[in-house]
């Protein structure tokens, strides 16, 4: 019966077809229907301070900008999505359409030039698709980047003058699914250009009359899309300069299905091949195999020799035992090895409980991301899921810390539970408030509004803390952890170790091996965060995360064994910091 069930399950899995669900329902646009375009906060890899799009002298929509509905995760990650003045309709081509005219003041010119100097990029969105950036390489070929948006301007290499991209070619791709009347947007790219526009016949526009929207521009060719070869002069950023913003819209049919339209964004058009991640996995597995063989060989060989030696001592007479009294090893500390930590046992329980909470939260978040529940298409979903999993794992933190504290025969269990619920989260919240205040001082969109701060604090106080106390209740109700040896009344003195057996040396060197097993994938994660790119290979991340846990455990077991052989029974804090040194 079991064999039949296995065969049936394999047949079902073989015939199953995956469908990528980016978190929104497909929208079919009828010909001529408006396709709204939204603008997100300006970002820069040089400052990491996102700024409001309408803080710069750009065209504003009629009635002023309005915020799009956002979730908590979007606010916490610095997203600020608003409507835009661009008018885009399905399958309707637009040729050099005038959007508005802005006359720069001295302050506006300085602000715009400063943001161009720091490399700020626009981040536009159409039908939940971020705008890719189309530019030229050094050899003059077109190149498309699918993450990070497109720049707002550039600085001339020779004259060091600042120019703004005041014209954009908005290139959209659409797909017509079978049985549907409308069309679906499956591609969105922007080609920015800097054009010094002038009206034909010397017409001077005041920026308000409707006549300026229909007057022909000398810098544009009628019924032709803007091309870089036709640009006569760039639009300089200087006080009293009149900047005319224009845009083109082109539509192109694509065979890309709506379900796979995010593939090119996630793979960055295969800029980083998958072989790099496989090399990382292979490197990590080889490190784990080497370390596992090393641990097994050392422990089996040494333990077998030690146990044989101790068994021989048991068969000796009393006179012979006195002669062998100078023997040393891990068995001499068997009465002290399970002695509670001599320094801060409560803090040790708190940190172990908080570590279990963070570790399980990371594992759950990576698993959900690996199976596709948390995709980049749902902005802020990763941050929201992390907060939710962290709160739910509060019961695990309370259970682990209380169970361990009970085995240490601690009496201040209320204090231990309270600190487990508030120590690490409170430190993170205070740090978050500190940096949020700094971001608010710089008027960055990364600063979280006060209402969202209240929501986060309410989630912590009303959900996370009660769950910690709930887990602690079951932890204290459970039976105490039983140890295989009886702890002596008087602690054994720890002999003076040599340099290589000093705990601080072992802690400093312990984190190198686990870090070597995970540094490649960690590099991609940190690069994605810093360079504002999409990270999608959570399957590799899950494997590397498990390898990291195994490597930390093996290194810690090996080093603790050598500490016990050196008759150092104070291994609790040593084991915690040995594996924790990987983070440093």
Image: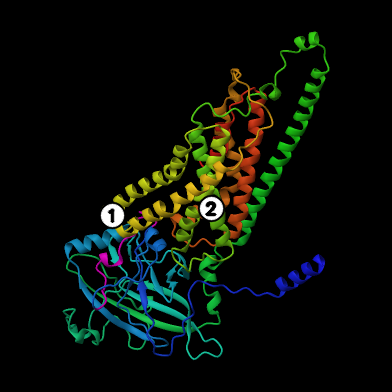
For the stretch drawn in magenta, the main secondary structure is loop
Q: Which mark is residue 220?
A: none
User: Is 565 inside the magenta-drawn segment?
Assistant: no
Residue sitting farthest toward the front: 477
Question: Image height check: is 260 above or below 409?
Answer: below
The local crowd at label 2, few if under 14, some if 14 to 19, many if 20 or more residues have their Cα within 10 Å, is: some
Asked if the residues shown at circle 1 and circle 2 are in contact, with their CB atoms under 8 angstroms apart, the answer is no
For marks 1 and 2, give the CA distance. Answer: 29 Å
Residue that badge 1 annotates: 440
Residue at horizontal 41 percent and vertical 61 percent from the top: 73
365 w.r.t. 514: above or below: below
Task: Nearest to the eye among marks 1 and 2: give it.
Answer: 2
- The magenta segment is 45-62
Residue 278 in sight in this render: yes
Q: Compared with residue 324, is residue 229 higher up or lower down, i.e. above or below?
A: below
Q: Residues within 10 Å of mark 1 (few under 14, many from 20)?
A: some
Q: Name the N-terminal-most of marks 1 and 2.
A: 2
Q: Hey, which quadrant is residue 421 in on the image?
A: top left
Name the residue nearer the viewer: 312 or 243.
Answer: 312
> Hey, which quadrant is residue 293 in on the image?
top right
């Amino acid at each position: 019966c079991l064999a039949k069930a296995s065969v049936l399950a394999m047949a079902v899995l073989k015939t199953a077809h995956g469908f990528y669900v980016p978190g929104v329902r497909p929208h079919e646009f009828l010909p001529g229907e408006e396709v709204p375009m939204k603008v997100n906060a300006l970002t820069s890899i040089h400052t990491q301070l996102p700024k409001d799009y309408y803080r710069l002298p750009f065209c504003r929509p009629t009635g002023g900008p309005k915020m799009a509905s956002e979730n908590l995760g979007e606010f916490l990650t610095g997203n600020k999505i608003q409507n835009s003045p661009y008018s885009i309709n399905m399958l309707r081509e637009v040729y050099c359409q005038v959007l508005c005219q802005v006359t720069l003041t001295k302050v506006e010119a300085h602000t715009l030039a400063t943001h161009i100097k720091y490399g700020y990029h626009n981040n536009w969105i159409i039908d939940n698709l971020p705008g890719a950036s189309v530019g030229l390489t050094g050899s003059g070929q077109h190149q498309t980047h699918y993450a990070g948006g497109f720049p707002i301007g550039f600085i001339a290499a020779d004259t060091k003058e600042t120019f703004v991209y005041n014209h954009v070619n908005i290139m959209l791709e659409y797909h017509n699914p079978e049985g549907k009347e409308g069309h679906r947007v499956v591609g969105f790219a922007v080609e920015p250009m800097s054009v010094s526009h002038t009206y034909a016949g010397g017409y001077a526009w005041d920026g308000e009359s409707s006549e300026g929207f229909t007057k022909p521009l000398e810098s544009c060719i009628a019924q032709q899309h803007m091309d870089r070869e036709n640009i006569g002069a760039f639009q300089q950023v200087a006080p009293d300069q009149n900047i005319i913003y224009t845009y083109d819209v082109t539509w192109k049919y694509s065979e890309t299905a709506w379900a796979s339209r995010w593939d090119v964004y996630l793979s960055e058009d295969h800029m980083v091949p998958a072989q790099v991640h496989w090399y990382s996995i292979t490197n990590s597995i080889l490190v784990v195999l080497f370390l596992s063989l090393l641990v097994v060989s050392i422990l089996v060989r040494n333990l077998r020799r030690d146990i044989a030696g101790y068994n021989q001592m048991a068969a000796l007479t009393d006179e012979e035992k006195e002669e062998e009294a100078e023997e040393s090893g891990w068995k001499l500390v068997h009465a002290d090895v399970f002695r509670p930590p001599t320094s801060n046992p409560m803090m040790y329980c708190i940190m172990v409980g908080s570590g279990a909470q963070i570790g399980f939260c990371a594992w759950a978040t990576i698993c959900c991301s690996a199976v596709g529940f948390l995709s980049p298409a749902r902005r802020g979903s990763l941050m929201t899921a992390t907060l939710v999993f962290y709160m739910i794992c509060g019961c695990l933190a309370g259970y682990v810390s209380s169970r361990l504290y009970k085995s240490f025969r601690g009496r201040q269990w209320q204090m231990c539970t309270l600190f487990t619920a508030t120590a690490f989260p409170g430190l993170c919240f205070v740090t978050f408030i500190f940096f949020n205040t700094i971001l608010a001082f710089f008027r960055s969109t990364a600063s979280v509004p006060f209402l969202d701060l209240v929501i986060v604090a309410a989630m912590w106080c009303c959900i996370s803390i009660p769950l910690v106390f709930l887990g602690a209740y079951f932890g204290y109700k459970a039976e105490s952890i039983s140890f295989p040896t009886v702890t002596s009344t008087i602690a054994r003195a720890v002999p003076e170790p040599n340099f290589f057996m000093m705990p601080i040396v072992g802690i400093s060197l312990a984190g190198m091996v686990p870090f070597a097993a995970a540094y490649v994938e960690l590099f991609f994660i940190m690069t994605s965060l810093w360079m504002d790119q999409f990270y999608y290979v959570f399957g590799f991340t899950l494997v590397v995360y498990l390898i990291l846990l195994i490597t930390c455990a093996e290194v810690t077991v090996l080093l603790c064994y050598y500490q016990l052989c050196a008759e150092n029974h104070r291994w609790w804090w040593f084991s915690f910091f040995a594996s924790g040194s990987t983070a440093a």
